[in-house]
Amino acid sequence: MGMTRLQRVQQWLVFARQWHIVDAQGQDIDRLGEKVARFLKGAHKPIYHPETDCGDHVVVYNCRQVAMKGFEWKHREYFFNREYPRSKNLLSAWEIHEFDPCRLMFLSVYQSLGRNLVRRRHIERLHLFADDEIPPRILQNVSNQMEQVQSVPRRSDQISAEERSRFPAIFDWKEDHLVDWEAPRVPPAEPTEKKK
Amino acid sequence: MSLLLRVLRVLPPASAAQSAALSTSTPLSLRKIQETVEGKTTTVEVVDVQSDRKQKLIPVRDEHCSCPLCRLAVKVSYEDVLILEQFMRKDGTVLPKQLTGLCFGQQLRLERCVMQAHWCGLFPDRTLPGFDRTGYKKYARYWSDDMDMYRLKHNVVKASWFYVKRYDVGKGRPYPKIPANSAET
């Protein structure tokens, strides 16, 4: 069985240090962290072994727009403890994210890499960017765009009028429907306090 | 005799008195309040208008529930912006079920989905002006179900202080190890 040209290039790529890029906009931070950690370790390669140094570089951009489920931004708290006096700290996720938009993505990937000695070497190949501005010396190495872990819903202003007109109507108004009933309701004015 | 009774029951009570002619279908007409000013006289009248939904309406199937969302073979979620906005006013509030014809359960489901869509910022042009987007509410979120808002869980994650920070992530941050926009080609 000889190799085809494509298979030969794939073989080179497996043994090379590849660069992947992924857009974190609207992606779940845990699932994206697990996927990125898989690529950093090289676990997606057939030659993977924990002691083999076969990990890839991963560039994650738009870290500021990373998503959490429901009210997790408020209800998830991170406990930092360096085991020195007065070094314990409990911070909610959105406070950390507000100070440094890349820190939570880093924490998610670092935990997904597992508790081992090589994870500090693997995490050095992670490149995080808060926005979509990536310096060209990083971007010139990138050879692959990773698939996102979930689809991002479209906003109503991103849908064109042509597509909106093609979309079927779910229901029609009842008989003798007054069109003015659909108008926005004006909230009643707040009662003013009488001066005594 | 029973046939005649059934015919009489089919007829709406108002039209039975006015017109003696039997009709198999009642004409659907929407109305609209119109004000016209001619000189000094202002005429306020109710005018018939055509529904713009009539041409693209999904046909009704005979099911146990005849409400528009029950007969739709789709479980509506917060991502279905084009479905949700048909049940909404211009300011993003949900129309009452007396106007839309939804059943009780579907109306609650729809209100949850619309609220989730508002929280995700999917209706930026239909939001009430005082909608709160401060603090944790300004960051992106998603939902896997319409009941997710009731499944609250407070969890504490053990975090690591170890952090490799090589790039300048914002203004005034003291990490100039490698400037972010240096182009080396």
Image (cartoon, rainbow, N blue to C red):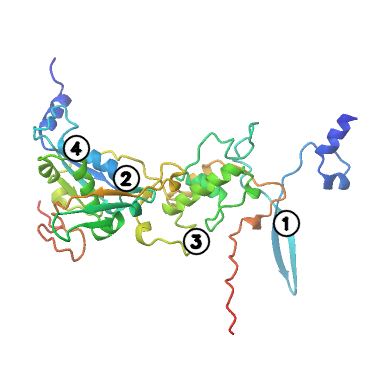
Local SS, label 3: loop
* Amino acid at pointer 1: Val
Judge if badges 1 and 4 mark residues of a common chain: no
Local SS, label 2: loop
Q: Quadrant of the C terminus of chain A?
A: bottom right
Residue labelled with disc 1: B47
Report the number of discs: 4
Residue labelled with disc 3: B128
Residue A52 position by quadrant? top left
Local SS, label 1: strand
Q: Residues within 10 Å of mark 4 (few under 14, many from 20)?
A: many
Residue labelled with disc 2: A27
Q: CA distance from mark 2 to mark 1?
A: 50 Å
> x and y percent of residue B50 in the render?
67, 49
Q: CA distance from mark 3 to mark 2?
A: 27 Å
* Amino acid at pointer 4: Phe
Q: Is residue A169 left or right of residue A5?
A: right
